[in-house]
Image (spheres, rainbow, N blue to C red):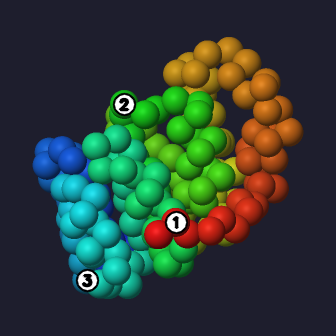
Amino acid sequence: MPESILNNKHILIVDDEPDVLDALEEQLEGFEGLLIDRALDYERAQQLLHSWTYDLVILDIMGVRGFELLDTAVHMGFPAVMLTAQAFNREALQKSIELGARAYLPKEKLSQIVPFLEDVLTLSHQAGWKRLFERLGGVFASSFGKGWEKDRKQFWQDVQEGRYEPSPTILKR
């Protein structure tokens, strides 16, 4: 496999569907020195987040309390990516951004996840969201409907142009 920022990284993937974990591992196999930890539920994910240092965390939203895990990962300084099917909607996208996720991907793009993960590890927070919208803006528009961003036009414009910076939040205990 060619040189990649994913080489020699430690990644946690969390999803309540074992087949999704298997598919993610398959997409990531072959990267030199890449270590992957898996969790099928919230409790195991929390245990792993508090036991290891991760270069990247990939979280499902539904079934594993993904937003709570996102909050933990961000506050621990781990870049986090939200990967979802059931919660692929405008509200979950906005919440993911506001809580500090570095990307928000539909599971239907799972086979193309490597470049998105490489962007998360190489680009700044703002530039990463700009690139994501360049790649997936059409997917968001077709999934969420025409004019989906009009209710918070400035927010979405800032995200799409790489100007949005999430505000610090207080970790819930």
> In this rendering, which labeled residue sits more in front, label 1 or label 3?
1
Q: Nearer the viewer, residue 48 or 130?
A: 48
Q: Earlier in the sequence, mark 1 or mark 3?
A: 3
Please name the amino acid that badge 3 sits on: Gly
The circle drawn on residue 92 is: none
The circle drawn on residue 86 is: 2
Q: Position of residue 87 (x, y in %)?
A: 43, 34
| Residue drawn at x 28%, y 58% as measured from the top left | 42
Compute the Cα span from label 1 to label 2: 25 Å
Q: Is residue 102 above or below residue 124?
A: above
- Residue pointed to by mark 3: 33
- Residue pointed to by mark 1: 172
Please name the amino acid that badge 2 sits on: Gln
Across the whole image, how many numbered discs are drawn on residues? 3
Q: Quadrant of the N terminus?
A: bottom left
Q: Nearer the viewer, residue 65 or 154?
A: 65
